[in-house]
Image (cartoon, grey):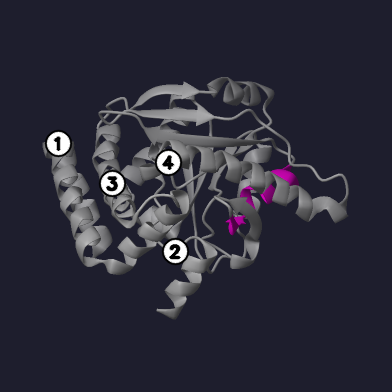
């Protein structure tokens, strides 16, 4: 029912304008803030970790901003699929161009920050092949017609669930890379096998990040890049792509340590982005270990 409503509002917005879904999403986000204490509590605890020196009212303010920043992504998405340019700049695009010319492909580590549709658009503009690995929740946020539009423009989509045996689409992802394509997978949240976690230091806490993109880069031998998108102003976004790096273990015994080091490097980059754009990291469930334990005990 929820996916049907989102799809319907998206279709109406494409006809009458992005303001419609923006208005609708603003009120839905306000309702979540006021009447979904578990969601509100999770974000408040998130900002308690990010801003430990600030008070509860400030953490509530951050939560309000986060909820409504996420609401704005729906109207931005409609503008994007209506054909409006949503990207002001793509920093580091030369790294993608160089890898594409070499035909090596690559692993793109994304995050639940900003808009992954904007990142996909950056690939479309450059004409590169992209396999986008989504969790079931992310996929449900994208209307079927919008997903078809992305696929028509060369973006392949694989939806993974908790029932999947492989954390990164298995042979499909490996084959795609070896054919010179790029595979994008989230590096912050674990939405498949919970055993694929690797412990990193993040905002002074020991947190389990997914090892999937780092393992995929190691197995395929393809370079790994980190991509972030964030909303700048007036619905415009900026894309930042890191220089490529290899994830290669000197020996079989060093595999876990190499993956952990790669995940730690990503965690440090994500922490820097969250500090710069704290309302655009869209995590709405308990994320840090203590918060997750308290959530289970409630």
Closer to the N terminus: mark 4 or mark 3?
A: 3
Quadrant of the image occupied by residue 193 = bottom right
Residue 53: x percent and y percent? 43, 50
The mark that comes first in sequence, 1 or 4, is 1
> Residue 65, labelled with which disc?
3
Task: Find disc 2 in the rendering and name its residue.
Answer: 286
Q: Which residue is mark 1?
A: 17
Q: Which residue is mark 4?
A: 116
Looking at the picture, tell me which residue is in the foreground, 240 or 185: 240
Q: Which tag is nearer the camera, tag 1 or tag 3?
A: 3
Label 3 residue SS: helix
Q: Which residues are magenta?
A: 205-220
Measure the alpha-carbon separation of dots 1 and 3. 23 Å
Frontmost of labels 4 and 3 is 3
User: To which quarter of the image does residue 35 belong?
Assistant: bottom left
* 3 on left or right of 42: left
- Quick one: 179 or 226, which is closer to the camera? 226
Q: Secondary structure at mark 2?
A: loop
Q: CA distance from mark 4 to mark 2?
A: 22 Å
State which mark lies toward you, 4 or 2: 2
Rendered location of residue 21, percent (x, y) = 18, 45
Q: Which residue is drawn at the image coordinates 57% and 20% (left, top)?
A: 94
Disc nearer the start of the sequence (1/3): 1
- x, y percent for residue 245: 70, 33
**Is 217 situated left or right of 209 in this image?**
right
């Amino acid at each position: 029912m929820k996916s049907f409503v989102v799809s319907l509002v998206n279709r109406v917005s494409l006809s009458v304008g992005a303001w419609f879904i923006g208005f609708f999403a603003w009120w839905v986000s306000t309702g979540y803030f006021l009447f979904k204490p578990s969601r509100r509590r999770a974000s408040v605890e998130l900002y308690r970790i990010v801003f430990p020196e600030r008070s509860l009212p400030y953490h509530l303010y951050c939560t309000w901003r986060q909820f409504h920043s996420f609401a704005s992504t729906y109207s931005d998405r409609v503008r994007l699929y209506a054909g409006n340019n949503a990207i002001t700049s793509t920093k580091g695009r030369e790294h993608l161009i160089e890898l594409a010319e070499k035909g090596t492909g690559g692993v793109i580590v994304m995050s639940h920050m900003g808009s992954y549709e904007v990142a996909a658009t950056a690939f479309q503009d450059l004409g590169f092949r992209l396999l986008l690995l989504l969790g079931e929740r992310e996929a449900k946020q994208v209307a079927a017609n919008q997903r078809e539009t992305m696929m028509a423009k060369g973006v392949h989509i694989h939806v993974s669930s908790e029932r999947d045996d492989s954390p990164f689409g298995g042979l499909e992802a490996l084959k795609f890379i070896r054919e010179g394509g790029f595979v994008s997978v989230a590096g912050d949240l674990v939405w498949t096998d919970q055993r694929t976690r690797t412990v990193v230091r993040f905002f002074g806490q020991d947190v389990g990040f997914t090892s999937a993109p780092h393992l995929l880069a190691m197995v395929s031998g393809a370079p790994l890049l980190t991509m972030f998108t964030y909303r700048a102003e007036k619905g415009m976004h900026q894309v930042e792509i890191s220089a490529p790096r290899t994830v290669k273990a000197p020996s079989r015994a060093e595999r876990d340590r190499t993956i952990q080091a790669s995940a730690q490097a990503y965690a440090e980059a994500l922490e820097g982005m969250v500090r710069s754009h704290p309302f655009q990291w869209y995590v709405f469930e308990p994320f840090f270990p203590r918060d997750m334990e308290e959530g289970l005990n409630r």
